[in-house]
């Protein structure tokens, strides 16, 4: 009489893909993932978190730049699961495999140009806070130089930014503190002297409380005609409202006949009369509040102007 005993066991890898793989453009590669367990594990593959149609072997034919990414193999049975990730990087015409276990490069065929493996991403920061844009690259040889550009101009040429910006050893750009004018497109360029430098870009948006940028001491309105009292505003995100005062009292344009608030925050007086004369202030607000009211602006009404 035979007695069969079945023992359950979670998956464990028998073969797994390399952690990092540099590969020649146009060639084909195969990533292998095999696992044992009881019951037998199923193998699933994912690229950058999205499922792929593959089993124990994943073949990438005629590799292109679009094939760069993280390929994760998951072995799963009802007792548990294990996963392994292979980072596939297109690096010129050469193939390098990095062994995380031996902490060394192996199968080095030749040198290759620098390749960005972690590009910068769009970032939003509050003015006065620090900002960091990453730009991680790999190359053989590894003498990588990083250059950062703001709206196409290298940051070392921008005195207003260069004093607050620093390129760290890992290639990331660190800005502290941030100013409103730091907003813009930042580009990271990497090179090791081989091939064409590679570039990746991202937008940095600096937000701040709404503020008045200019307060005319005197503004004139033409009696009997339409006229505008201007409030020059800068805000990120855009202002949501503007509070007005006239002669140190709250002034609500929405409840004042023939006065309209324009999209830029200024006031349109559709038919000016002497009652509109006075001393005005505007105070813009956005999601971050306000930087304060404008200086006092004296609005004077002049006699009816001739129509030309």
Image (spheres, rainbow, N blue to C red):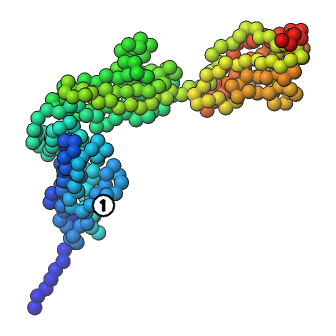
Residue 302 higher or lower than 121, as above or below:
above
Which residue is nearer to you in this view: 268 or 66?
66
Which residue is nearer to you in this view: 110 or 295?
110
Which residue is nearer to you in this view: 117 or 28?
28
Quarter of the image where one finds residue 74: bottom left
Residue at image x 19%, y 46%? 27
Residue at image x 79%, y 23%? 268
Residue at image x 87%, y 21%? 271
Residue 219 higher or lower than 42, as above or below:
above
Image quadrant containing the N terminus = bottom left
In the image as oriented, which residue stretches furthest toward the bottom? 1
**Along the horizontal axis of the image, is 149 left or right of 264?**
left
Place of residue 189 in the rendered image (x, y in percent of width and height, measured from the top left): 31, 26
- Mark 1, residue position: 53
Residue at image x 48%, y 25%? 183
Place of residue 252 in the rendered image (x, y in percent of width and height, measured from the top left): 81, 27
- Residue 165 appears in the figure: no
């Amino acid at each position: 009489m035979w007695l069969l005993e079945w023992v359950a066991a979670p998956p464990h890898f028998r073969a797994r893909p390399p952690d990092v793989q540099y590969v020649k453009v146009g060639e084909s590669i195969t990533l292998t993932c095999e696992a044992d367990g009881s019951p037998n594990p199923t193998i699933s593959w994912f690229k950058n978190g999205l499922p792929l149609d593959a089993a124990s072997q994943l073949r990438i034919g005629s590799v292109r730049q679009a094939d760069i990414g993280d390929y994760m193999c998951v072995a799963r049975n009802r007792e548990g699961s294990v996963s392994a990730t292979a980072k596939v990087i297109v690096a010129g015409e050469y193939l390098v495999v990095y062994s995380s276990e031996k902490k060394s490069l192996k199968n080095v065929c030749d040198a290759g140009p620098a390749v960005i493996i972690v590009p910068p991403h769009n970032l939003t920061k509050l003015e006065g806070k620090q900002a960091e844009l990453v730009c991680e690259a790999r190359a053989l040889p590894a003498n990588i130089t990083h250059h950062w550009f703001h709206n196409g101009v290298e940051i070392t040429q921008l005195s207003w930014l260069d004093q607050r910006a620093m390129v760290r050893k890992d290639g990331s750009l660190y800005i502290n503190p941030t100013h409103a004018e730091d907003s813009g497109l930042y580009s990271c360029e990497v090179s090791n002297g081989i091939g064409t430098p590679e570039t990746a870009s991202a937008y940095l948006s600096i937000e701040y409380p709404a503020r008045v940028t200019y307060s005319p001491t005197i503004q004139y309105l033409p009696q009997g005609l339409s006229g505008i009292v201007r409030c020059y505003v800068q805000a990120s995100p855009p202002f949501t409202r503007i509070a007005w005062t006239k002669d140190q009292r709250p002034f609500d344009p929405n409840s004042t006949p023939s006065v309209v608030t324009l999209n830029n925050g200024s006031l349109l007086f559709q038919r000016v009369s002497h009652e509109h004369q006075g001393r005005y202030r505007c105070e813009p607000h956005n999601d971050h509040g306000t930087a304060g009211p404008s200086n006092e602006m004296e609005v004077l009404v002049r006699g009816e102007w001739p129509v030309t």
